[in-house]
């Protein structure tokens, strides 16, 4: 087969797009929201407890729930003390086939990697306590028994990625405070915007790292925990991902949020709430 030189066609295509232009690069990076560069900061980690720790009737009988009364407090601690996190990844397993010429590879399945989270340790060492108890329930080294799978896996773990510059303003909930502060005549600080999220299903700790103590100048104590999970899903804003079933034309479903929310009416006053309630009562009486 003769070799066709496609250099000219490829060169014209490359030059007509970005073409290595610094101006085009800067206009994309500093311009539209879609092409802005993301940072490693502004993220949130949230975990849940398995049935063995939160309590409830399961396959293995009634679990008393070792941390049932401390569930909300512990979830807040894990979220605030998470220092570093690695997002889950997926690998495609392949097989190979050779008929004539070069060998080709084809997909046979998929596997998932483990995730690791680094926690700062509070003085109560509740992080270490929870994971030690969790792993003891999973595989008790005293009797060499393991618990039921559905009892020791946490239903969901969440990782949220934020970026600066949401369309939502941080405004007071009270109408009078809102008006005294300037109302829609002033600019309000904005919430951070969620641009991506990872949902991990059926998660359990696989290994807990060591803690290092020293007589040198004091440093923060951290705990590295590795988690295994069944599967994960990644979600992003639909306007970045093209067409969806509910959005067949690829339009922005958050059209109402394009304008800043303080340009509308702001928080509603008590008088307007009373008027709406009276109007509903009149309509009910007519019917």
Image (cartoon, rainbow, N blue to C red):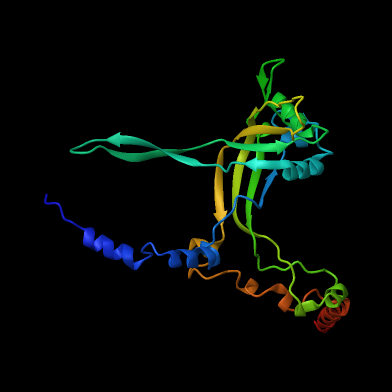
Residue found farthest to the left = 2
The count of marks equals 0
Q: Where 192 sits versus 132, above or below?
A: below
Q: Nearer the viewer, residue 133 or 160?
A: 160
Q: Quadrant of residue 246?
A: bottom right
Q: Is residue 281 visible?
A: yes
In percent of width and height, residue 256 lies at 64, 74
Q: Quadrant of residue 206?
A: top right
Q: Where 13 sits versus 229, above or below?
A: below
In percent of width and height, residue 208 lies at 66, 28
Q: Where 156 sits versus 134, above or below?
A: below
In percent of width and height, residue 32 lies at 53, 68
Q: Residue at x 65, y 75 (%)?
A: 259
The reply, left or right, for residue 124 in relation to residue 30 is: right
Q: Residue at x 70, y 37 (%)?
A: 119
Q: Quadrant of residue 108?
A: top left
Residue found farthest to the top = 143
Q: Nearer the viewer, residue 6 or 195?
A: 6
Q: Nearer the viewer, residue 42 or 239?
A: 42
Of the 4 image quadrants, the one containing the C terminus is bottom right
Q: Nearer the viewer, residue 186 or 59?
A: 186
Q: Is residue 246 visible?
A: no
In percent of width and height, residue 271 lies at 88, 80
Residue found farthest to the front = 217
């Amino acid at each position: 087969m003769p070799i066709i030189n496609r250099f000219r066609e490829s060169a014209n295509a490359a030059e007509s797009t970005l073409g290595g232009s610094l101006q085009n690069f800067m206009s994309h990076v500093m311009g539209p929201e879609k092409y802005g560069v993301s940072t490693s900061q502004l993220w949130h980690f949230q975990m849940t407890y398995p049935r063995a720790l939160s309590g409830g009737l399961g396959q293995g009988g009634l679990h008393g729930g070792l941390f049932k009364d401390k569930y909300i407090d512990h979830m807040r601690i894990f979220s605030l003390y998470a220092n570093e996190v690695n997002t889950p990844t997926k690998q495609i397993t392949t097989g190979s086939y050779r008929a004539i010429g070069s060998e080709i590879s084809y997909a046979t399945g998929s596997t998932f990697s483990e995730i690791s989270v680094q926690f700062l340790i509070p003085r109560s060492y509740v992080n270490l306590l929870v994971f030690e108890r969790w792993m003891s329930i999973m595989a008790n080294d005293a009797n060499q028994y393991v618990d039921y799978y559905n009892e020791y896996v946490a239903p969901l773990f969440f990782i949220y990625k934020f970026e600066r510059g949401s369309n939502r303003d941080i405004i007071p909930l009270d109408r009078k405070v809102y008006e005294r502060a300037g109302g829609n005549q002033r600019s309000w600080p904005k919430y951070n915007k969620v641009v991506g999220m990872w949902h991990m299903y059926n998660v359990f700790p696989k290994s807990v790292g060591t803690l290092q103590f020293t007589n040198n100048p004091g440093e923060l104590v951290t705990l590295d925990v590795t988690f295994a999970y069944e599967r994960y899903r990644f979600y992003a804003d639909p306007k970045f991902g093209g067409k969806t079933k509910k959005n067949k034309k690829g339009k922005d479903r958050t059209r109402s949020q394009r304008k800043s929310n303080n340009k509308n009416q702001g928080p509603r006053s008590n008088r307007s709430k009373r008027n709406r309630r009276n109007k509903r009562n009149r309509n009910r009486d007519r019917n």
